[in-house]
Every structure is written in structure tokens, then in C-alpha cells.
Image: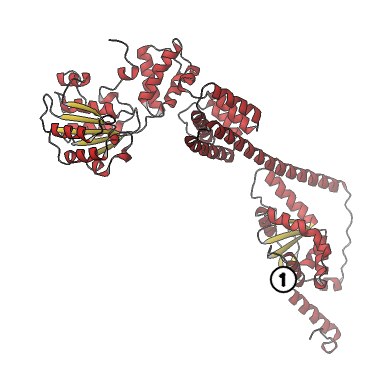
Amino acid sequence: MGYQALYRTYRPKRFSDVVGQNVIIRTLQNAILNNKVAHAYLFSGPRGTGKTSVAKIFAKAVNCEKAPSLEPCGECETCQLIEEGHLSDVIEIDAASNNGVEEIRELRDKVNYLPSFGKYKVYIIDEVHMLTQAAFNALLKTLEEPPAHVIFILATTEPNKVIPTILSRCQRFDFRGISPSDINKKLIEIRDKEEIDISDEALNEIALNAEGGLRDAISLLDQTVSFSGEKITIEDVYQVSGSVSKDNLIKLVNYLKDKDASNAFFLLNEIIEDGKEISKIVADIIALLRDILIEKNITFEIERPTSYLKDLAQDYSNDRLFFYLDVLNETQNNIKWTMQKRAYLELALFKMIDHQDVVRIEEKEEIGLLMNKINELERSYRELEKRPVQEIVVKNSEEEIKSQPKRKDGREITVKEIEEILNSGNKTKKNLLARGWPNLANLKTPHLQTTAELLLKGELVACSDDKMLIVYPDKTSCLMLLRESTKKLALEIINSKENHVNDIVCLDKTNWDLLFTSFLKQWGEGNKKPKLPKVDLGIFATNEKKYQSETLSLAKDFFGADKVIVEGE
């Protein structure tokens, strides 16, 4: 006999030879042992996962002379005839080429004949989803009331195309894709038996390229042996499978990260000229990015060498990886329906490079501004520390003390308010108001001019969704703006065209520099919600009615109630 392909040589002959389908095998073995064999089975799943092989082993097991047992003996005449394909009681039908109603009617007529040699007649119909509607209907009656000596095993890769009335009459077993680790173990077994000189790295790449199909993996190994001849390396596997080499994939994604469009497109051109398919290139890039994402966020080991992934994971943010994967997934869908596959892939590269460019500029600008502000504030504090301490003379004027609003009569401006405004900052609103700030000098409305001038003396430093923060050189200006009537006019000015804010918070520059330095330092250290130090700001929003009432009371006590006249009354 001539050379036999490896996948045929190592086709499972016993249940124990089947790889990766433990649940299905155990269920079928128990059914045989307990004499609870169903009349119809549906084996569904991807190609190369063992559907037809298990069907043949099952046919041997139920007809074996030593049945019921966990395994067919493989030695009796029945087992040997089935293995050689010479037993007339086990009939294999390819539904792809025998999908007409006449073939199924012929089958239906023959099922009534008793088995000639074994206990059961077993019909294995491969790719059953290829049957026509009429053929399905012809098969339906037989499946509904089959003879006791007949077992149907229907195999398909597309169970969704099998009509529901057929599905409901079968025990369904879904064969899953075989894991790369299980495929790799089988390949190592074949390598050792066949004495093939191939590296573990190359075997692992074959297992990954098989995409869950053991038959595909063994066929690829066979093909690679024919291609290489002597020692097989991972480069030989790349050549035969059409995959992009790991080194080229890493170079390509690094060029994208570094926005190196020239080298990225030069490398892509090399890969395409090497004969790689566009769809395979996209799939390989997606697989690499998926591995980087998992390495970055998951602690357990994935079924792929991870030594080169650790360095890559540090260079890519989750946001960048998510964007790359979204773009490539869209590209993968688009290239299915176009003749311009290369153009779509090149467009995807441009998208990824452009997105990365925008993200980098925003990050660098923000970090640069923060660092400059921190350095400026640190220089200012060093200069203040060098200055001699001056004696401060405090005037103890009873009249001045009495003229100040009492704390209990107003709302205190707290550090918590400042913290909330900074942490929930609305940069768009702040920039919009800041652009219009110089226009306050041109305000001609008589009753608003004084308030506009007071606003102009301050610096708008931050905005939240409903509040704005203004910094003044001294506390006096803060207190003036926070008087109830003044603040009402200020809000009228600010919200004249659009309702921007509902409240105004003021702060003197000394306290602002202290708080903002702390905020910037924490932000620079990676804290996205900085906590400001507790400081007594000493600023109160005055309740003007209570303030006027207190002043009126003092005037009446001093001059006499009959001498005091209140304007407007």
C-alpha cells in the first residue's frame, strides 16, 4: 500500500482515541452499557472535531461481538469489517452529493431489511444540512417510526439549516472546537511516533492555526513535513499556513503605536507580496491585540507563549487596544464584500495611526501644562520662603469690626465646594465663558456696569456644570461679589444669553495657590479625584437683609429711632 495521509493514519479507532470530546464520549458509552441506544443522533460542530469518526466508532461499539462494553474490541470480525468499510450494515451517505428525494426514498425502502451480519443497521448521513426540503420530508417519516434494528447518525457543520422537525426527533450532541493544548498533545504524540524533526514552537503554531480542528492540524503538519523535508521551524509553518510571522506582527503594531506610517505601509507591502491573504493578515493582527489585552488585564496564563507579550502590554493602553480592535473588526466585515481588500486594510492603518496621534497630543499638552504650573508655583513658594517675616499691625477698630458681616448670618465658602468644582470641571464651559470675559469692559447697561467691573477684576479659573470659581487678589473683592444683591446681578450678566451657571464661588489668590498646588501635585501622581487640604478660607456669602437689619439696629441705638430715616420706606 502507498503512502497514507497522517490524518487517515491517526484517525480515532476507539473512544479513548477521541480528543477533546469527553462529555459526548462518556454519554455514548453509558448509553451502550445500559442498552439505552437511541434510534437517531445528530452530531453537530466545526469541521475536524471528530463527528464522523465518533459515528463509526459508535457503529462498531453497538455491533461488536463483545458488546455491551465501553470500547469496541477491534478484534472481532464485525469490528474489522466496519474498520475496513466492508460491512453492508454500516452505510455512509454523503448528503452533499446525494441530497435528492429519490436517494432518501431508496434509503427508506431499505431500512426495513434486517441487518445481514451485525445487530444494528447504522446509517451515517454526513453534511445532512445539504438535503433538499423534499428529501428532509422523505426522511422525516422514517425518523419518526424507525425499525428497532436501525440507528441514524446525522452529522452536520450547520445545524441551523436542519429543519426543526428533524432536530426534535434526534438526540443532539454538539462537538466543540478542540483546545490548542489538546491539539498540541496529539501532535507531539504523532511527532514522536513518526520521528518528525520539528520544534515545539512550530507545533504550537500549527495547533493555533488549526482553529479547533484536529484534522486540520494533522493535515497542516503533514503538509509542512512535505514542504520542509528536514528540520521543521516555525518559519516553515508560517510559509505553509499563510500566517504572518510573530516578529512582523509585533513590528507592525509598534509602527502603528509610534505613528510611523512609512514603515507600517512598507512592512504591510512586504507581507502582502510574500503571498499572505488580506483576511489572514487582519485575523492575525486581531489575535495579537487580543493576546496583549488579556496579558494586560488577566492574571491567568493564556494558551499562547506570553514572554513577548509582557513588554507589549506595558506599551498599550486599554483605550488604544479597544480602538484598534474595533477598527480591525469593522475592516474584517468590510473585506468580505469587496474586491478592494487591500485598500480597506490600508484605510484601517490610517485610522489607527490618526487616532493614536490625537490621543498623544492631548495627553502631552495636558501633562505639559500641569507640570509648567507646578514648577511655576514651586518657584513662587521658594521666593516667598526667602523673604524676611514682616510684623503685621492689626487695627483694633470697634467701628470696623461692627461693620463686618457676622459669620452666622451667611453661608461659608468651603474647601469641599472648591474640590467638587475642580473634580467635576467642565472645560468646554470654562473656555466659552473665558473667551467672553474681556467683553465685560464693554457692558453699557447702567445698573450692571459696577458689577461687571467687579467681575473683570477677578480671574475665572474653573467651571462645573452649575458653578463657576473666580479668584481675586484679596478677600475684600470676594466678599463684595458674594453679597446677595451683587451676586444676583453677576449671574444676570453671565447668563444673559444662555443659562451657564446657577451659583458663583469666590476665593482669594493666596488660598487658591495653596489649594491648586495640592490639586496639581495629586493629579500628576495619577489621582484623578484629588482631595484638597482642610483650610479655613474665611469667606462668607453675606445674607444682605440680615446685614442691613443689623446696621439699622446699630444706627437707631446710636442716633435714636426718631432720627433714623430709611430710604425707600
**Residue displayed at 68% across by 42% down:** 363
- Whether 358 is drawn above or below 28: the answer is below
Left or right: 160 as drawn, with respect to 387: left
Which colour scheme appears in the figure? Answer: secondary structure
**Residue displayed at 87% across by 70% down:** 397
Q: Nearer the viewer, residue 54 or 368?
A: 54
Provide residue 495's location: percent of width, then percent of height. Answer: 71, 65
Residue 85's quadrant in the figure? Answer: top left
Q: Please identify the quadrant where the C terminus is shown.
A: bottom right
Left or right: 114 as drawn, with respect to 458: left
Q: Residue furthest bottom?
A: 562
Provide residue 371's location: percent of width, then percent of height. Answer: 74, 42
Left or right: 270 as drawn, with respect to 506: left
Q: Which amino acid, mark 1?
A: Lys
Q: Nearer the viewer, residue 194 or 339?
A: 339
Q: Which residue is mark 1?
A: 408
